[in-house]
Image (cartoon, rainbow, N blue to C red):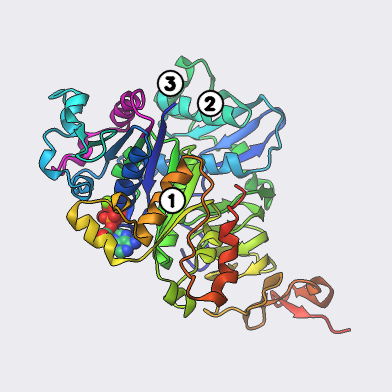
Amino acid sequence: MSRIIVITSGKGGVGKTTTTANIGSALARSGKSVAVIDADFGLRNLDLLLGLENRVVYTAIDVINGECRLEQALVKDKRQPRLVLLPAAQSRGKESITREQMKEIVTRLSAKFDYVIIDSPAGIEMGFQNAIAPASEALIVTTPEVAAVRDADRVIGLLEANSINNIKLIVNRVKPEMIKADEMMSVDDILEILAIPLIGIIPDNQKVILSSNRGEPLVLDEKLSTPGVTLKNIARRLNGEDVPFVDLMASQENFLNRLRRWFTEPSR
Amino acid sequence: MNQNGDTAQESPVSLQRNQQEVLLTFPPPPSEETIDDWGELWQNLKHRLNGSERFWESGAFVCIQARDRLFDSSKLSAIAQALAEVGLTLHCVETTRRQTAVAAATAGYSVRQPSPTTPLTRSSPTQQFKQQEPLYLKNTIRSGTEVRHEGTIILVGDVNPGGAVMAYGDIIIWGRLRGLAHAGLKGDRACRILSLQLQATQLRIADVVARTPSTHPAQLQPEIAYIAADGIRITQGLDFLKTYHFVSEKQFWQERSF
Ligand SMILES: Nc1ncnc2c1ncn2[C@@H]1O[C@H](COP(=O)(O)OP(=O)(O)OP(=O)(O)O)[C@@H](O)[C@H]1O
Ligand SMILES: [Mg+2]
């Protein structure tokens, strides 16, 4: 049985595409077959982050319009033989795809891949609705900012209304020094509001920006960086492995107490 | 929203018991035909079905009061499916709209068509009673969700920032209140808001609005918000009823003089 996971956030620019590219690559490297879908029609960039821009020939829209077969539109990753990308159309014809069409494409992919991962656009409009329609699981990406958490909360409510109840949380761009100085929400603060299980904490790190510019996902580095490890760990947890959380605050001993609760996975 | 708390917007989906069946009442459709509020309506419906106390036996019959809303067969089947998930059986559709009646009949549901001029008496018990029975909810009211009830609301769970709870009666929250709460929505100034942790962004009781301070005491305990002589006040919940009483001539709560 294939797992169909949507990566979504409500607020824009919090790291959905970054996580999709990395989790997809990490899962593929661990031996799973993975299809990542760019559902951000009009603003596609999953191909960029995977370094596949120059290989895109057809898009999901061409498949829907019958201009090519689904297999033709799938772009094979240059490093991971088990990873494929279904690109989004660059044109702004957002209305040109329906929930039903999205579901149909994903159903066809799910017959062939262990994981189908959908990179959702920001917002809660049509594009978001299309992206979540086929999903049975969701990863919510948020940053430790009040507005991002508020939007994440809204999206969780919408997912639940669409009977997607397997929802896990990724907190991205965490800055330990700011949390220490009480200038940023802690992961605990966020969990208290959102009340869903945590699956990853990713530090704010320039390497993330560098890797997206190069189109080289961090999880494929020879020597993994801290953000690379935390991203890879998300993939491992998705696979059912019990991986302890990296202690991002290791240098701030007195804050260990605050962290302790993350080490024991929330029970839900 | 005006001072009395009346909103132009209608109360969302309501679920009530009737003698032999469960009544699922939808708000009237938006005045402009072009506005599609189905997404919002659907979220509301799921929220109400999953969050409310199950006062029905499994398999209980439901009558939808669709008013003059347009429900086609796919919407009716989505509603029936959502009802089935919580052990309810769609059985009848009451509507003033011909297309909805046709869709319902085609799908095999019994159809009631009250004439549009006679009010849907059973759907508006406020004509006979001041308030409905309390609404008992067990879930988190997340950002963007608004719960409205023509009676008291009892919530076991949190109200998150951006969420709202509006009640004709009292609001009792066994959890954290961090969103908006409005008790006494129809003007009853004796209504109160009770919460384990009162950190609301804004509190409203009847026609009075209070913003809560941006800093909160570190040690939060159950508190109660009520209308005092000088506006909304918050006090420890524990001894409230022993020490305060509502003075109806003055329309506010006052400390008892022993
Ligand atoms: N942990 C991080 N540390 C530093 N920069 C980050 C981190 N995560 C993401 N970024 C940067 O933030 C920007 C937005 O990331 P990304 O495109 O993944 O977000 P998104 O949620 O997909 O955005 P959109 O809503 O526009 O689709 C990128 O420039 C990315 O490199
Ligand atoms: Mg993106």
Residue placed most toward the observer, B238 or B244: B238
x and y percentages locating residue B115 in the rendered image? 50, 29
Residue ID at (43%, 76%): A177
Residue ID at (27%, 41%): A39
Q: SS at mark 3? A: helix
Return the mark for residue A233.
1
Residue ID at (33%, 42%): A24
The picture quadrant where one finds residue B53 is top right
Residue that carries the numbered disc 3 in the rendered image: B103
Q: Which amino acid does label 2 sit on?
A: Val
Q: Do the residues labelled 2 and 1 touch (CB within 8 Å)?
A: no
Q: Which amino acid does label 3 sit on?
A: Ala
Chain ID at mark 1 = A
Q: SS at mark 1? A: helix
Residue A116 included in the magenta stretch of the image: no
Can residue B151 be seen here? The reply is yes
| Magenta part of the chain | A89-115
Q: SS at mark 2? A: strand
